[in-house]
Image (cartoon, rainbow, N blue to C red):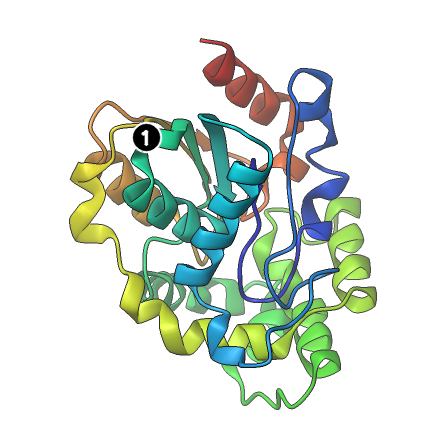
């Protein structure tokens, strides 16, 4: 199963890029509440990690899966770690892909990485917008912000992969309500002090140049989960399956087949 972030981007960001996994495995995915094709709850506060992990387990029960491999990217990795802590008996393999460790850690990453990006012409405009004031009153506002800052998430901001991600966020339903709800509630689901409780076989993946879920977070996760493996993609940012697909899929398939 692939867990998308809960803050509103939906699974569509991953659908084409992760399709190669379906050649070797059955890939199951869904849009979290309020994202993509999923309905929004009447109370936006229900869009939180606790609800997301219970939704994931409801899907597991519906599909009659006793154990499965779970992959989570970015905030989806944060959800995945919460899931395996609550439902450890159901996860055989855990793949944490440029995973968000908490709420303080991404802010610390950005504080450390953004100044250098702002001095480089390839990322300067995106860095200025990321650091500036934000008007997020609608889904369209959020889509436009993501479109303009996405170069920061790529090792090569001029690549076709970056342009494809920009096209997706400009045209997809991106939920500002989900983004605001998760931002307000994520602090209730912190996992850093609980990583030692995770017993699933774990693979930690990260792009060397990820500015917001950096190798610093990945190393902390790796150090916290006994027996975990870590792979760093040297020419990738936040989306290594798009920038180094051969190395990425080799690492994932080898881990799952072992």
* Count of numbered badges drawn on the protein: 1
> With respect to residue 146, does 79 lie above or below?
above
Question: Looking at the rendering, in which quadrant would you find the C terminus?
Answer: top left
Residue 123 in sight here:
yes
Residue closest to the far top:
258
Viewed as shown, does residue 78 lie left or right of 170? left
Viewed as shown, does residue 5 lie left or right of 231? right
Seen at 83% across and 66% down, the residue is: 171
Closest to the observer, 192 or 33: 33
Q: Quadrant of residue 220?
A: top left
Seen at 73% across and 51% down, the residue is: 12
Closest to the observer, 51 or 95: 51
Seen at 31% across and 27% down, the residue is: 200
How many neighbours does mark 1 have within 10 angstroms: few (below 14), some (14-19), or many (20 or more)? few
Residue labelled with disc 1: 89
> With respect to residue 169, does 3 lie above or below?
above
* Residue 121 position within the rendered picture, expressed as x and y whole percent measured from the top left: 63, 65
* Residue 78 position within the rendered picture, expressed as x and y whole percent measured from the top left: 40, 52
* Residue 116 position within the rendered picture, expressed as x and y whole percent measured from the top left: 45, 63
């Amino acid at each position: 199963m692939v867990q998308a972030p809960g803050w509103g981007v939906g699974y569509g960001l991953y659908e084409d890029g992760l399709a190669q996994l379906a050649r070797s495995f059955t890939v199951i995915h869904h849009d979290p509440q309020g994202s993509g094709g999923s309905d929004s709850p009447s109370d936006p506060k229900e869009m939180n990690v606790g609800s997301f992990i219970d939704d994931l387990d409801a899907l597991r029960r519906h599909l009659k899966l006793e154990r499965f491999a779970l992959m989570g990217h970015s905030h989806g990795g944060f959800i995945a770690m919460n899931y395996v802590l609550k439902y450890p008996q159901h996860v055989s393999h855990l793949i944490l892909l440029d995973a968000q460790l908490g709420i303080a850690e991404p802010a610390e990453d950005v504080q450390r990485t953004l100044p250098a990006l702002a001095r480089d012409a390839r990322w300067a405009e995106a860095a200025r917008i990321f650091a500036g004031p934000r008007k997020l009153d609608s889904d369209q506002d959020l889509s436009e912000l993501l479109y303009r800052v996405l170069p920061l998430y790529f090792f090569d901001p001029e690549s076709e992969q970056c342009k494809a991600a920009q096209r997706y966020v400009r045209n997809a339903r991106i939920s500002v309500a989900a983004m605001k709800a998760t931002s307000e509630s994520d602090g209730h689901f912190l996992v850093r002090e609980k990583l030692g409780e995770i017993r699933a076989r774990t693979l930690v993946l990260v792009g060397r140049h990820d500015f917001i879920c950096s190798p610093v977070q990945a190393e902390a996760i790796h150090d916290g989960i006994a027996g975990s493996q870590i792979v760093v993609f040297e020419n990738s940012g936040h989306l290594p399956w798009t920038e180094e697909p051969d190395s990425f899929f080799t690492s994932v398939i080898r881990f799952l087949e072992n």
